[in-house]
């Protein structure tokens, strides 16, 4: 998405409002892909003036009530995303689109702010381990312990074989690797 400077927006809007060129002619003149941005800028300028064309550098957090008011206004009046944005002095009508989708999917819960960033993986792993530990019966615990002991035993056998004759161990695994890679190549 191309971001246009405030000066460029003001230049095009004033040229549209006070000149003799229409949307299509201006967008062709300035090599813009469509007329939509210019139409949005003109509407914002008419309602909010130059402030409607400014890009806000800080991300503003809107309250749940504000989001709900905007969504309800749109649903009750049948206003477009852009008209709703203008009504609520928002520069970005796509925010209302996201709010409406979230409201339709999740209700008011969808309008509540979510924590930022990625959730910690360690917490997820610990929760999963705790759930698994709680769910296991005594018999399942013993089966799990047996499986872990079998794996440990197999590992120790391979380690002992490697220590006794490292070259033979490597040759054996090279052959296995080559045969597996040939199988994959032929598939």
Image (cartoon, rainbow, N blue to C red):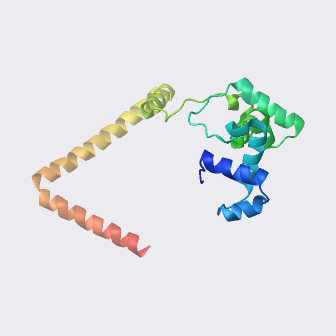
Q: Quadrant of residue 106?
A: top right
User: For residue 101, what is the image quadrant?
Assistant: top right
Q: Examine the rendered structure and indicate whether residue 179 appears above or below residue 146.
A: below
**Could you tell me residue 172's position as x and y percent?**
21, 63
Position of 114 with respect to 69 (left or right) is: left
Q: State the residue in front, 72 or 52.
A: 52
Question: Residue 179's x, y, as percent?
Answer: 31, 69
**For residue 183, above or below residue 62:** below
**Residue 95 visible somewhere in the drawing:** no
* Residue in view at x 31 percent, y 42 percent: 150
Q: Residue at x 68, y 64 (%)?
A: 29
Residue positioned most to the right: 77
Q: Position of residue 11 (x, y in %)?
A: 67, 51
Q: Nearer the viewer, residue 74 or 52?
A: 52
- Residue 45 appears at what percent x and percent y? 74, 42
Residue 59 shows up from this direction: yes
Using residue 7 as the reference point, say whether residue 168 is left or right of it.
left
The residue sitting at 61% across, 47% down in the picture is 7
Depth order, front residue of 87/126: 87
Quarter of the C terminus within the rendering:
bottom left
């Amino acid at each position: 998405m191309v971001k246009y400077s405030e000066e460029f927006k003001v230049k095009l809007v004033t040229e549209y409002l006070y000149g003799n060129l229409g949307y299509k002619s201006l967008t062709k003149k300035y090599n813009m892909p469509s007329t939509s941005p210019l139409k949005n800028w003109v509407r914002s300028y008419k309602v909010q003036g130059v402030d409607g064309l400014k890009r806000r550098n800080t991300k503003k957090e809107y309250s749940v009530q504000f989001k709900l008011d905007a969504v309800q206004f749109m649903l009750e009046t049948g206003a477009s995303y852009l008209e709703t944005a203008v009504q609520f002095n928002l520069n970005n009508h796509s925010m209302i689109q996201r709010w409406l989708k979230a409201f339709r999917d999740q209700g008011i819960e969808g309008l509540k702010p979510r924590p930022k960033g990625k959730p910690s993986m360690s917490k997820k792993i610990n929760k999963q381990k705790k759930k698994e530990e709680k769910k296991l019966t005594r018999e399942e615990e013993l089966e799990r312990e047996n499986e872990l002991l079998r794996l440990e035993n197999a590992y120790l056998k391979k380690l002992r074989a490697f220590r006794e004759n490292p070259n033979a161990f490597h040759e054996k695994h090279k052959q296995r690797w080559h045969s597996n890679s040939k199988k994959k190549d032929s598939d």
